[in-house]
Amino acid sequence: MFLQALLSRCRPAKPLRISPHRFASFLFPRPQARHQPRLLLWGTAISLATYLTFSPRTVHLDADSQSFPEPSSEDSAVDPATSISFPKTMRVSSKINLPPLSLIGLGVRTVSFLNIKVYSIGFYADLDNPDLMVPKDLSPEEKIKYIVRNTACVIRIVPTRSTSYTHLRDAFMRALQARLVKGKQEGTLTEDDAQSAASPMRKLKSLFPNSPLTKHTPLDVFLSPPTLGRPRALVFRDLGAIEHDWVATELVLNYFEGAVPSPALKKSVIEKLETFGTK
């Protein structure tokens, strides 16, 4: 009797039966009502950020980065070193009305003693700006500085071979750091000015993705025209923008002062501006 009672207690229990519906609800429970306000708040924040990023107040270059039709020969200039074409007139696509910009000069960037051609560069500016009164008696170098400081400009970079955004980013940062040091040494940049440039330079560095920039894909760097009461913007097409007068103008002037990235570009622009002037 004792053995029989013991065996009856050791019988396996009946299997637990759970319906498929209850099992799925156990693995993927529905969110509780108390989480709903947080989700709504995040959605509102994302919508607000989108509005601030693409509101009409912000210059946004929204051209298709995957398609760049070649301009016709009569409407373009060709870099003889790379055979890359640049339109003689560029219209910047943006949320605000911007005038067409004129091609002033172009040239190739080469590296190492082998003169490897890295990319072609075109320099554009709004020369039809009625407020741009360039004195004719200035030297071509002074005219370049006057134009950069007083009207909208674009630096267009077209790689001759596939490269990366980080490669260009590093070149931009090196150029700005060098000009920062030079400005402090020459006394044209105060310590306070240098400190104020630190944050926009960090933001500029963060704009560039770790991804390739394919051969013959233009990267346009747009310098907004001066606006009273607001710092100038430097907009990298499809990447983002920074706002700071010194950073924005100095990055563009880097192509024409000191050890320039492309002597051919500087020479081309100087030749164009030799006789240019409005007063």
Image (cartoon, helix red, strand yellow):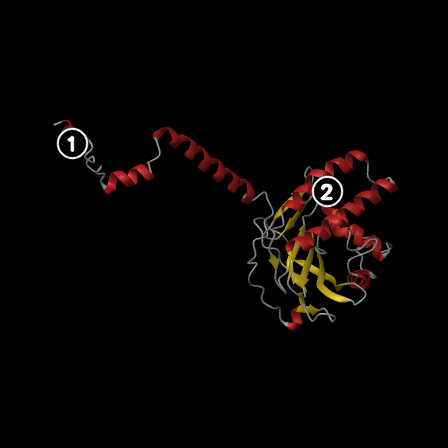
The residue shown at (69%, 60%) is 102
Numbered circle sitting on residue 245 = 2
Residue 84, quarter of the rendered image = bottom right
Is residue 92 toward the left or the right of residue 24 in the image? right
Q: Where is residue 164 in the image (x, y as percent from the top left)?
A: 64, 57
Q: Which residue is drawn at 44% across and 37% down?
A: 43
Task: Tell which of 216 and 107 is nearer to you.
Answer: 216
Distance between mark 2 and mark 1 Cα atoms: 89 Å
**Quadrant of the rendered image containing residue 200:** top right
Quadrant in which the C terminus appears:
bottom right
- x and y, in percent, of residue 185 in the image: 87, 41
Q: Is residue 75 left or right of residue 274?
A: left
User: Who's the residue at 84% across and 57% down the image?
Assistant: 140
| Residue 246 versus residue 166 in the image, above or below | above
User: Badge 2: few (under 14), some or many (20 or more) residues near its Cα, within 10 Å?
Assistant: some
Q: In which quarter of the image is the N terminus?
A: top left
State the mark number for residue 279.
Answer: none
104 in relation to 250, above or below: below
Tell me which amino acid carries mark 1: Ser
At 65% across and 69% down in the image, what residue appears?
A: 75
Q: In this view, does 257 lie above or below 36?
A: below
Tell us which disc is closer to us: 2 or 1.
1
Identify residue for label 1. 8
State the SS at label 1.
Answer: helix
First along the sequence among labels 2 and 1: 1
Q: How many labels does the image show?
A: 2
Crowding at dot 1, Cα within 10 Å, few <14 / some 14-19 / many 20+, comes out as: few
Farthest left residue? 1
Dot 2: what SS? helix
